Amino acid sequence: NTRERILATVQFRGVTCELVEAWFHIGRREFENEENRILSHFEKTLREWAAVNDVGRLNSALDHFAVRNQTSLLWTVFFEAGAEYPATLGTLLEGVLSEPVFLTHPDYAYGGATLLGAFHKAGDQRQRERLESLILNLPDNVQPREGESSESVRSRTEYAQDRLLNVLEESNIVLDAVRELRRERQAVKPLPPNPRP
């Protein structure tokens, strides 16, 4: 029953996208040779379009992806490319970071944190405030999984916050509350890295 694997839905490019739990974070990105070749070619092409700001092709790729999105891997592919080119492809993806699943669930969190970190580094004060607010407000926005204890939700959310705080460059932090949270958490233990699945 695939309905049990849907973590959340997000509006993206006028389409309701279901975010599916695919366990990508514990598997490897190893497919049949042809699938690997196709995916690698797509990643290369997507980066080429982003590098030259080929808006028509980027928009077409995103529109097709929105209609067909089925795996966290493809979200990660778009997020990684968007993080490399935040001024072109990245700006077309920024709005979805408001969905907590992209920042907390292991299938999506690497890409979400990578994209958030790139935006924060390249952004202006207003954009940095918005991104930092997403981190601060994460405990209020994370939904418990079915049967999940409040302690588990708190632990999962704090870990996600710590990972997100670690992708920020301290000198770019705008909100005092975020700077203080980062210092408090670092005083207890080192902030976790954002490892690529």
Image (spheres, rainbow, N blue to C red):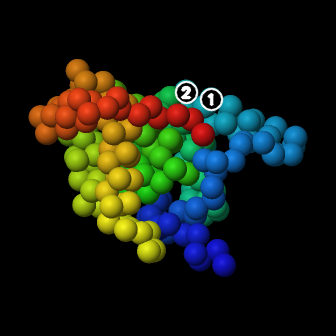
Identity of the residue furthest to the left in this view:
176
Residue 120 visible here: no
Mark 2 and 1 residues: CB-CB less than 8 Å, in contact? yes
Apparent side of residue 69 relative to residue 138 in the rendered image (left or right): right
Q: Amino acid at mark 1?
A: Glu
Apparent side of residue 136 relative to residue 150 in the rendered image (left or right): left
Q: Residues within 10 Å of mark 1 (few under 14, many from 20)?
A: some
Q: Secondary structure at mark 1?
A: helix
Residue located at (44% from left, 64% from top): 11
Percent position (x, y) of residue 161? 32, 44
Query: Which residue is identified by label 1?
Result: 48
Residue located at (78% from left, 42% from top): 30
Query: Which residue is identified by label 2?
Result: 51
Q: Amino acid at mark 2?
A: Ala
Q: Quadrant of the N terminus?
A: bottom right
Q: Secondary structure at mark 2?
A: helix
Res 42 → quadrant: top right
Percent position (x, y) of residue 89? 49, 38
The residue lying toward the viewer, choosing from 109 and 19, is: 109
Is 145 rendered above or below residue 69?
Answer: below
